[in-house]
Amino acid sequence: MRPIWSGHISFGLISIPISIYSAVEASERVSFRMLHRKDHAPIKYKKFCSKEDVEVPTDEIVRGYEVDDDEYALLEKEELDKVEEASSGTKGEMEVLQFVDFGSLNPLAFDSPYYAAPRKGGERAYAVLREALNDAHKVGIVRFQLRAHPRLGALIPGPSAIAVESLLPYEELRAPSGLPLPSVKPKGGEVKMAEMLIDQMSTEGWDPTEHPNTFKKSLKQLLSSRRRFRLEAGGEKPERENVVDLMEALKKSVGQARSKPARRVPARKRGAA
């Protein structure tokens, strides 16, 4: 696998050189390409000006943000880059903001899964962090910049690897208050019967291999009878030396954390999922 991001996990005085890799096997996804029925040529999309009806080159395109109904403010790429850099912290740093119980995360906020793996010199500190998170049953909330965009993420420990799950901003999640939810109170007997059914259908654990992609299997059977044709052809960053003694840095970081007042976690908005 090729890394899509390289930098450092930083918390306290600890800095762990890592790279992150996509945890999704793209080749297993079912995807299609748009083709012209007449000659099987690929369909391409071009950027046209809706007013002049002409194709617009990239250097003539700017971004507009809708500040009010049909009212836009123009932004240049350089301006956006500065705002994104200022809101995502130091480039190449995955800063740990806090550690929380996994149960306090909202699964609806999970966006994209990745794996984090140590780079040269970070193997020991990586293993220490992984085992400490597993023993404490905690996940780390991090802030970093991925593909020039600021992201929040969660460091989720596994038996061998630390996963990084990018998180959607809470503002992008809708509250369920606008849904047509039932207000009727269920009867106690009905709830007990539902609990009995849940208990009968419960298993020791979740095995995803028992639920393969049936759509892909059916699609392969369909494609096996179709005629095939071919379409016509139309620098890593330098390593940073880790000269800080790991145990000494951990001791100092714990001391610094104790000297700071406990941060109050804001209560969730009423009605949030």
Image: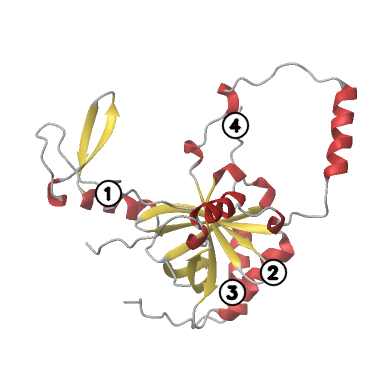
- Report, in whole angstroms, how far the alpha carbon at label 3 lies from the one at label 4: 35 Å
* CB within 8 Å, label 3 to label 1: no
- Report, in whole angstroms, how far the alpha carbon at label 1 lies from the one at label 2: 45 Å
State the residue at coordinates (62%, 66%).
Answer: 255
Of mark 1 and mark 2, the one earlier in the sequence is 1
Under circle 3, the secondary element is helix
Of mark 2 and mark 4, the one earlier in the sequence is 2
Mark 2, residue position: 159
- Report, in whole angstroms, how far the alpha carbon at label 4 lies from the one at label 1: 42 Å
182 left or right of 265 in image:
right
Q: Tell which tag, 3 or 2, sits nearer the viewer.
A: 2
Q: Tell which tag, 2 or 4, sits nearer the viewer.
A: 2
Residue 12 can be seen, yes or no: no
260 left or right of 168 in image:
right
Under circle 2, the secondary element is loop
State the image coordinates of residue 254 (x, y, percent, origin top left).
63, 66
Mark 1, residue position: 43
> Considering only vertical position in the picture, is 167 above or below 248?
above
Mark 3, residue position: 126
Q: How crowded is mark 1: few (under 14 residues within 10 Å), some or many (20 or more)?
A: few
Of mark 3 and mark 4, the one earlier in the sequence is 3
- Report, in whole angstroms, how far the alpha carbon at label 3 lies from the one at label 1: 46 Å
The type of residue carrying mark 2 is Pro
The type of residue carrying mark 4 is Ala
Instruction: Give the number of the disc on residue 272.
Output: 4
